[in-house]
Image (tube, rainbow, N blue to C red):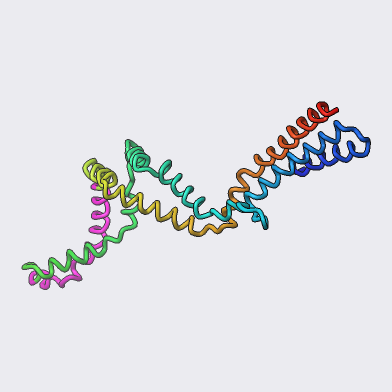
Amino acid sequence: MNKSFLTNFISLALLAAGYVTHNHILLYAGLFAFSGAITNWLAIHMLFEKVPGLYGSGVIPARFEEFKAAIKALMMEQFFTTENIDRFLTNEMAGDKTINLEPILEKVDFNPAFDSLVTVIENSQFGGMLAMFGGTEALQPLKQPFVEKMQESVIDISQSDSVKEAIKQQFESPAMMDEITTNIENIIDQRLNELTPKMVKEMVQKMIKNHLGWLVVWGGVFGGLIGIVSALITA
């Protein structure tokens, strides 16, 4: 059962019991408990919903732009800082975590490289001699071995220490850091721009509603205790 509803129900039950039995302690306890509980419940309700005539109500949906800016600031200043990005890249490229380009290079089409080589030979001083042996068609049987060897060689080069170090330095360069940070910021902006006041309200409400419910409970408890003390003093 909802904590707020249960607290208000118990408070009203005490109030009714005190009124019917003319018991001042129950009456005051119920009255003060209901006062504390209903006031806290209204305050929580006003965070998320606009109440006509009550200035400042509906503050979360009304200030959703500020909430979005706060979310962005939190992510950029606490998570995606230059230091954190640099640490991530350093860790990813250290030891066995080095960026592996082999899966990418295996998908690269090296056929244009062979075609370019054939064109160079054809336009060189060996072009005439090549024509005597059937022209460029005579080189076609070499195409597949050339492509496979080229791919193998490029993969070997990509795994050399000099290339790894060059890639690492490129990733750690200030210009690259700025570009990575800018791209992350643009992604965050894009996602935040998709939020509506209703979505922000529901997001915040979902995170803290259960915890705010205890404010109603404790408002009722302390209100009831104050009511009991007041009844004893005025008795």
Q: Position of residue 197 (x, y in %)?
A: 57, 57
Left or right side of 39 for 87: left
Please state the total of marks drawn on the protein image: 0
The reply, left or right, for residue 235 in relation to residue 181 is right
Q: Is residue 97 visible?
A: no
- Viewer-closest of 7 and 74: 7
Could you tell me residue 165's position as x and y percent? 24, 42
Name which quarter of the figure residue 161 lies in.
top left
Q: Is residue 200 left or right of residue 173?
A: right
Q: Quadrant of the C terminus?
A: top right
Vertical position of residue 143 compared to residue 97: above or below: below
- At x 43%, y 41%, the residue is 78
Q: Which residue is pictured at 49% across the width and 52% down the height?
A: 66
The reply to whether residue 82 is visible in this rendering is yes
Q: Quick check: is 138 in the magenta stretch? A: yes
Residue extending farthest front: 234
Residue 23 magenta: no
Quarter where residue 98 is shown: top left
Secondary structure predominantly adopted by residues drawn in magenta: helix
Quadrant (top left, top right, bottom left, bottom right) of the N terminus: top right
Query: In the image, which residues are magenta?
Result: 128-157
Q: Residue furthest right?
A: 21
Residue at point 86% right, 33% down? 26
Closest to the observer: 131 or 90? 90
Q: Is residue 41 above or below residue 122?
A: above
Residue 22 image position (x, y, % from top left): 92, 35
Frontmost residue, 80 versus 34: 34
Q: Position of residue 7 (x, y in %)?
A: 77, 39
Instruction: Give the residue displayed 48% in from the left and 56% down from the top.
Output: 191
